[in-house]
Amino acid sequence: MSIGNHAFVALSSGLMTAQWLCATQTRGWMVRLMDREPIVFFSCLLGTVGCGMCVVVPPVRRALGMSTSQMDGDSSGGH
């Protein structure tokens, strides 16, 4: 399985952010954030889900036989 450039950028950005958070924050920071700032926590959660969609959606669409031409940069519009 190979991933496209857009998926690689999303994965590397997410991994770098997770590495920075683990290196700079104390244990339990996520629980404290969820308790004190729930809007910020869920905004970050939605952003993570949105970034992960570019990794999950194209293979699922291909498996279902749907077109991924826009995601792959193909301008012909075909399958």
Image (cartoon, helix red, strand yellow):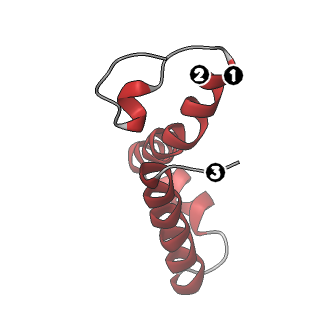
Q: Amino acid at mark 2?
A: Arg
Q: Amino acid at mark 1?
A: Ala
Q: Earlier in the sequence, mark 3 or mark 1?
A: 3
Disc 2 vs disc 3: which is toward the camera? Answer: 3
Q: Position of residue 37 (x, y in %)?
A: 42, 52
At label 1, counting other C-alpha atoms closer than 10 Å, the crowd grade (few under 14, some 14-19, many 20 or more) is: few
Asked whether 21 or 66 is in front, the reply is: 66
> Left or right of 34: which side holds 59?
right
Residue for badge 1? 63
Disc 1 on helix, strand or loop? Answer: helix
Residue 32 in the image: above or below residue 76: below
Disc 2 on helix, strand or loop? Answer: helix
Residue for badge 2? 61
Marks 2/1: CA–CA distance:
5 Å
Residue 42 in the image: above or below residue 5: above
Question: Residue 2's mark?
Answer: 3
Q: Earlier in the sequence, mark 2 or mark 3?
A: 3
